[in-house]
């Protein structure tokens, strides 16, 4: 697979181990067979659009994480120290993962490039309990995601199950 290529629905999610805002390493493998993982990639802590998104997502966490079978993480290339300050200042209720090496964002096709900010893209990836990509969507950098869109994405496995039961055909990529 080419570096920084978009992932396809159904393919295995690249494994990772990243520090959160408390400098605790979070590994994707720890959730396999247990939880669905929603990864909210964003360019930078404290930037206007990212701040607006996280301030909107926090109070609506129940819609993004509708049950105890789902876990949400923010992911950017900022340091754990920046994440700690950002999370504290805006009362963000989910962990923020730090990919300072940019290896994980590149593996997920979410690296925006070195110029001008050497940061991740804005996008959403959902990894199902089996460790496969269930949802993948890039968002234009300056356009915030809406809670309603993420709520629908969080229910993607139920929608696929319904479609499969109806004999429908799955379509790939960023629906």
Image: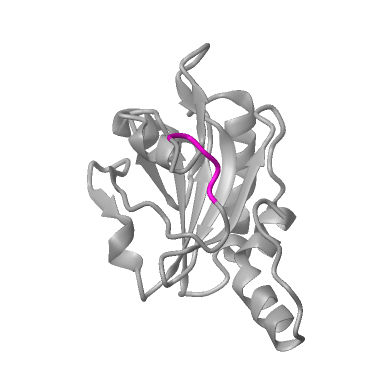
Q: Is residue 4 magenta?
A: yes
Query: For this view, does 28 lie left or right of residue 37?
Result: left
Residue lying at the far top of the rendered structure: 116
Quadrant into which the C terminus falls: bottom right
**In the depicted view, which residue is nearer to us: 125 or 58?**
125
Q: In the figure, residue 162 lies in which quadrant?
A: bottom right
- Residue shown at the point (43%, 60%) measured from the top left: 12
Q: Could you say where residue 94 lies in the image, as x and y percent from the top left? A: 44, 52
How many numbered circles are shown? Answer: 0
Q: Could you say where residue 106 lies in the image, as x and y percent from the top left? A: 43, 35
Q: Could you say where residue 76 lies in the image, as x and y percent from the top left? A: 44, 35
Residue lying at the far front of the rendered structure: 1
Query: For this view, does 111 lie left or right of residue 25?
Result: right
- Residue shown at the point (40%, 30%) measured from the top left: 77
Residue lying at the far bottom of the rendered structure: 165
**In the depicted view, which residue is nearer to us: 134 or 171?**
171
Q: Is residue 87 above or below residue 130?
A: above
Q: Is residue 113 above or below residue 156?
A: above
Q: Which residues are magenta?
A: 3-7
- Residue shown at the point (69%, 32%) measured from the top left: 140
Quadrant into which the N terminus falls: top left
Magenta span main SS: loop
Q: Is residue 142 magenta?
A: no
Q: Could you say where residue 160 lies in the image, as x and y percent from the top left? A: 66, 75
């Amino acid at each position: 697979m080419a570096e920084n290529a978009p992932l396809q629905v159904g393919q295995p999610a690249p494994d990772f181990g990243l520090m959160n805002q408390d400098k605790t390493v979070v590994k994707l493998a720890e959730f396999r067979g247990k939880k669905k993982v929603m990864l909210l990639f964003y360019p930078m802590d404290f930037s206007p659009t990212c701040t607006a998104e996280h301030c909107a997502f926090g109070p609506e966490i129940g819609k993004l994480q509708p049950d105890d079978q789902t876990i949400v993480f923010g992911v950017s290339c900022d340091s754990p120290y920046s994440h700690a300050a950002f999370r504290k200042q805006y009362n963000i209720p989910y962990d923020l993962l730090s990919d300072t090496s940019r290896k994980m964002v590149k593996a997920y096709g979410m690296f925006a490039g070195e110029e001008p900010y050497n940061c991740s893209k804005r996008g959403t990836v959902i990894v199902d309990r089996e460790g496969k990509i269930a949802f993948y969507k890039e968002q234009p950098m300056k356009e915030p995601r809406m809670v309603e869109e993420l709520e629908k994405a969080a229910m993607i496995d139920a929608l696929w199950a319904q479609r499969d039961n109806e004999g429908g055909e799955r379509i790939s990529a960023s629906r």
